[in-house]
Image (cartoon, grey):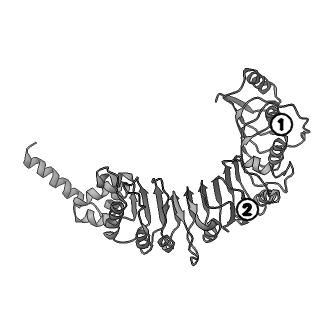
Amino acid sequence: MNRYMRNKTVTDTQGLANKLPDDIIRRILKCLPLHDAAKLCLVSRSWLCAFEELSELRFDAKVFAAVLKSKPPTAEELFNILSVILLSHIGTISVFYVCIPKLKSSSAPDIGPCFSYLSRNGVKDITIKNVENSPLKLSYHLFSCLNLERLTLDNCIINLLPFFKQFVNLKTIEFENVTFKGNSLTDFIASCPALQTLTLTRCKGFEYMEIIAPNLKYLTVLGNFESVCFRNAATLIGFSVTLEETVANHQSAGACELLAYLARPCKIENLSFGGHFCKFLTAGRIGRMFPTKYSCLKSLQLSNIETHVLDEFLWVIGLIKSCPVVEDLKISFSGKECEEHAIAFDSHYRLCGLRKVQLTSVSGVIMELKLIEYLLRCSPALETMSVKRDAKITKVLETRLARELMYFCRASPVAKIVYEDP
């Protein structure tokens, strides 16, 4: 192809691009990474205008690498990239995402002015992911973004301002490795009256969690803490809590209060106790007695159950019996062989809604087998029981497990047992 034909092809292509409707141009730019969208600004003035009016700005690692030719930026260079694009922007910004990469300098970037600008442009969704080893201390300007509906933070520090009142529109919070100064977590949650989904992963700066969130529906907590209590969260329908380390339970009354609150006034539908949380609860000597039934619970997941500990085993049985309409049950074990305990199971009790059971890390010890037999006997609607053996199971226990699974009686005529390797 000669030069004339090449130039004509480029001109024709630009002509076609210029004729695209503005809404189509905006859709195209919205689907592209920010650095690719910026390159298309060279096509024409209409494309540049559309770029300057993008409602979603996502500064991922590729953006900084493209501008700085893959070299680690300094804090000043990172701020300059953000400010140049923000200051050239026209109109509202609904989504602001920034992934702070590894920096050349040790000083943390100050992105407070970015929050100040965003607050005047109606931002609704902010995500800050900090890859740097040292956490990013967030500026007080963040609390001026009063239109926020979603806030996602990773490896940051929050210090709640004493004069701050509320994020009245904030519905979703996802925090990972966030440090709360001054034990301000409770106050921060209470300042979000519209909050519906809260996820806290390995956050720090608090020992006790008090949840005051009148519209909260889903709460997920993973990390280390000493207690969780609810003061105003009656709309909660999904609660997942994972305690990563063993913590002494000095407040057995608080554990009972937590379990009672989840049953009433909450109408909990999905419940998951992971890590060492079951051990934490049973250490409070709750025993097998539960304050009321979880009359709406459809899905129950329990992890790291030590069936050789009699109190914990009885607690699990009591909890399962308190969920009369449960449909999906998942249990992972960490049991050891022990002497058989005489357990008086209620032969007339039925889990009429239970259809699916998943058991993992099954090592074939006697108390695990008792629980499996009980579930098969009291579940007339059971469709599938999945049994995944533990990787370290002995040959003797594996043989006993396989034999017992074949001979256990089943209340459901269609129940199928699926035996799985780890």
Q: Position of residue 85 (x, y in %)?
A: 32, 65
Cα distance between the residues tagged 2 and 1: 32 Å
Say whether disc 2 or disc 1 marks the residue closer to the N-terminus: 2
**Secondary structure beneath label 2:** strand
Task: Specify few, some or many for label 1: CA neighbours under 10 Å numbering under 14, 14-19, or 20 or more.
Answer: many
Residue at disc 1, secondary structure: helix
Q: Residue at x 68, y 60 (%)?
A: 207
The answer to whether marks 2 and 1 mark residues whose Cβ atoms lie closer than 8 Å is: no
Task: Please tell me how crowded label 2 is: few (under 14), some (14-19), or many (20+) other residues with Cα within 10 Å.
Answer: some
Q: Residue at x 29, y 63 (%)?
A: 21
Task: Work out whether residue 345 can be spotted.
Answer: yes
Q: Position of residue 238 (x, y in %)?
A: 67, 55
- At label 1, the amino acid type is Tyr
* Placement of the N terminus among the 4 image quadrants: top left
Q: Along the line of sight, which residue is nearer the eye, 4 or 170?
A: 170
State the residue at coordinates (25%, 65%).
Answer: 46
Answer left or right for 97 relative to 11: right
Tell which of 248 and 145 is nearer to you: 248
Quarter location, residue 11: bottom left
Residue underneath mark 2: 229
When asked about the image quadrant of residue 110, the answer is bottom left
Residue at the extreme front = 106
The front one of 135 and 50 is: 135
Q: Amino acid at mark 2?
A: Cys
Q: Is residue 323 visible?
A: no
Across and down, in percent, residue 172 comes to 57, 62
For residue 134, above or below residue 318: below
- Which residue is label 1 attached to? 374
